[in-house]
Amino acid sequence: MKIRQTCLAACAVVTLIAGTAACTSDSPKPVDRPARAAADTACANGTYTWFNVDKRDVLTGVAEKQKLGKGGGELTHKPAPLHTPRTTVTFEKGPRVGAAAALRSLGAHIADTDAVYGDGDAYEFANVRRSAPDLTAGGTRVDGAGTFVDYRWVRQVTADFLYTCADGKRAAGRATSWFIHGSGLLECAEPVRDAKEGDPILVAARMSCGPDAPAARAEKA
């Protein structure tokens, strides 16, 4: 079976009959302030400390299953929205910190190039005005029979932070952003290998194929 799928964006990762990964970290880790932080914060020369970092792949949309006969064809069922990724910074106490500076610090903390230079633009990870990915973009044609589901996902990061000013004042808050958005295709009759509980492909399979479908059950390679 051959699958042809157009790319959603320059940074998009297409997942075809494969699982995705998630990871978390609970250990606080001081991070040096970004070079541009002083211009964006209420107090200069401060430092960020990040903790409760949660980085995971999140399902943003899934289509109804579509059955294709011999020879396959174009998938016409478009994903319905489930989750709209957002880029936000909320403050719990202390002097206000610039949202962009906080998000740039988070991108540096997780040490992921795609987070700092996502979508081909520097600091897109820190752009609080960017739009969510278009779920209707792209198209997929399958050269083979089966029952298929098209789904979309993003890699989302949420973390708590403390910002300590040079004069000792502190700000506390939480930052959320996302990087890498992609699409995936699954076949309801094919088990997913090496997927973990909560992975977008398993969630999509259970929603569209049904909980008893082979694709809804993860198998080890």
Image (spheres, rainbow, N blue to C red):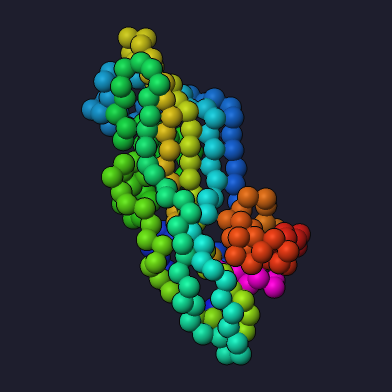
Residue shown at 48%/59% (left/top)? 61
Q: In the rendered image of this protein, does residue 48 appear above or below residue 139?
A: above
Question: Quarter holding the N terminus?
Answer: bottom right
Does residue 201 show up? no
Q: Most extreme residue toward the top, as rendered?
A: 167
In the image: residue 41, left or right of residue 1: left
Q: Position of residue 78 (x, y in %)?
A: 45, 69
Please tell me in which quadrant of the rendered image residue 8 appears: bottom left
Q: Most extreme residue toward the left, as rendered?
A: 39
In the image: residue 147, left or right of residue 194: left
Question: Quarter holding the C terminus?
Answer: bottom right
Q: Position of residue 217 (x, y in %)?
A: 73, 60
Residue shown at 69%/73% (left/top)? 189
Residue shown at 52%/27% (left/top)? 51
Q: Nearer the viewer, residue 28 or 202?
A: 202
Q: Position of residue 129 (x, y in %)?
A: 28, 45
Q: Nearer the viewer, residue 147 or 3?
A: 147
Does residue 75 show up? yes
In the image: residue 204, left or right of residue 13: right
- Magenta stretch contains residue 200: no
Q: Position of residue 123 (x, y in %)?
A: 33, 44
Please tell me in which quadrant of the rendered image residue 31 appears: top left
Q: In the rendered image of this protein, does residue 6 appear above or below residue 105?
A: below
Q: Nearer the viewer, residue 137 or 78?
A: 78
In the image: residue 155, left or right of residue 145: left
Q: In the rendered image of this protein, does residue 161 appear above or below residue 194?
A: above
Residue shown at 35%/15% (left/top)? 94
Q: Which residues are magenta?
A: 185-191
Q: Most extreme residue toward the right, as rendered?
A: 220
Q: Nearer the viewer, residue 76 or 92?
A: 76
